[in-house]
Image (cartoon, rainbow, N blue to C red):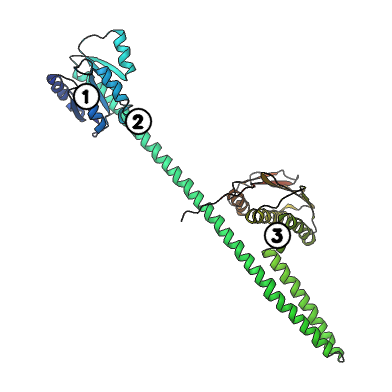
Amino acid sequence: MEPSASASVLVVDDDTANRMALQEALSPLGARLVMASSGEEALRRVLEDDFAAILMDVRMPGIDGFTTATLIRERARSRNTPIIFMTAAMEDVGSMFRGYRAGAVDYLAKPVVAEVLRSKLAVFIGLNDMNRMISAELAERALTEQRLRASEENLRALASHLESVREEERVRIAREIHDELGQALTGLKFDIGGLAKACAADPLVGERTLAIGMAIDRIINSVRRIASGLRPEVLDEIGLSAAVEWQGREFSRRTGIRCSVDIEANFADPDRERSTAVFRILQELLTNVARHANATRVNVHLADGDLIRMRVEDNGRGIEKGKFEHARSLGFMGLRERVLAFGGSIEVEGRQGDGTTVHVVIPNYVTQTVYHA
């Protein structure tokens, strides 16, 4: 591997002639050469620069090459830099072991053969460059993954915020429909009743006012149904458990599918956000049963503790394998996002012709979702 033109090599030797000879021998490499005449100067250099390789004389006045290499290894920027020792005398086994322990990757005997030196340095500089490239790519990948996770968290927080805003809007509209329109229709019915009494002598007027009164009753029932669909009063006034039982009865009445609701004894209603999430998930699951399952029975089980656990199972045709995870299953995607906003989970089990069971788990403690603008 060819060394990069920006690679720096530190040459440490107390002999001026040796340094000049090494500089001439290494010039064809194209690397930037930094010279140091002592171990102390080498330590200063590694604090100022990051080197691809270090050529180190073993025997120098002051601190020798072994001590210098050991101290260099303690410098964070040069901890992994390959060090090649140069020695004019054959080192004994103990000295060589000391050198390798200090971080040496090779030994060269003086006088150093230029071709051998360039060949070894080219390998070490190339490996160093490769490690730097890999480290840079890994760092970039980690940064990209971190940004993606932050973006995903922001999108999830934004989706949760928008869902909360939408729920508040439903509450507002439901109250306006129930209070204003409902009261106006009730008042109109009383007025029609008073008119009917005033015109009791005219049978034709009596029949027409009776028909109008019945029509107003139907409109009032429709208003109540629409308001309950937007935001059931029972959810805010009595709590989640009562709302789940009410939803089960409404589902049975509307679809003809038998719905059994089993709520664990001493169930304590959670906070408003979790109650709303569990209730909306139940509504969505029951809607899916009515539209797609071809079921005759649905069982709903609700329990609490450290976790709020809801199980919805039907005896219908069963969900197709992998359909829940399909990217285009927007309904299920919405369910996943609802539970993930609270750190929960949703699992779907189903076999063709053997019904579907959905397990919903939401931590039963207050967590704060932060939206980064």
Q: Quadrant of residue 205?
A: bottom right
Residue 305 location, x and y as percent? 69, 44
Q: Is residue 17 found left or right of 166 in the rendered image? A: left
Q: Amino acid at mark 3?
A: Leu
Query: What residue is at 31 percent from the left and 9 percent from the top?
Result: 94
**Which residue bears the numbered disc 3?**
235
Q: Is residue 219 above or below residue 136?
A: below
Residue 120 location, x and y as percent? 26, 21
Q: Is residue 66 above or below residue 223?
A: above
Q: Residues within 10 Å of mark 1 (few under 14, many from 20)?
A: some
Quadrant of image for the N terminus: top left
Q: Amino acid at mark 1?
A: Glu
**Which residue bears the numbered disc 2?**
131
Disc with the residue nearer the chain's start (3 vs 2): 2
Q: Is residue 185 found left or right of 101 in the rendered image? A: right
Mark nearer the viewer, 3 or 2: 3
Report helix, strand or loop for mark 1. Answer: helix
Q: Amino acid at mark 2?
A: Asn
- Residue extending farthest left: 17
**Which residue bears the numbered disc 1?**
40
Residue 287 location, x and y as percent? 70, 57
Report helix, strand or loop for mark 3. Answer: helix
Q: CA distance from mark 3 to mark 2?
A: 60 Å
Q: Is residue 200 visible?
A: yes
- Residue extending farthest bottom: 201
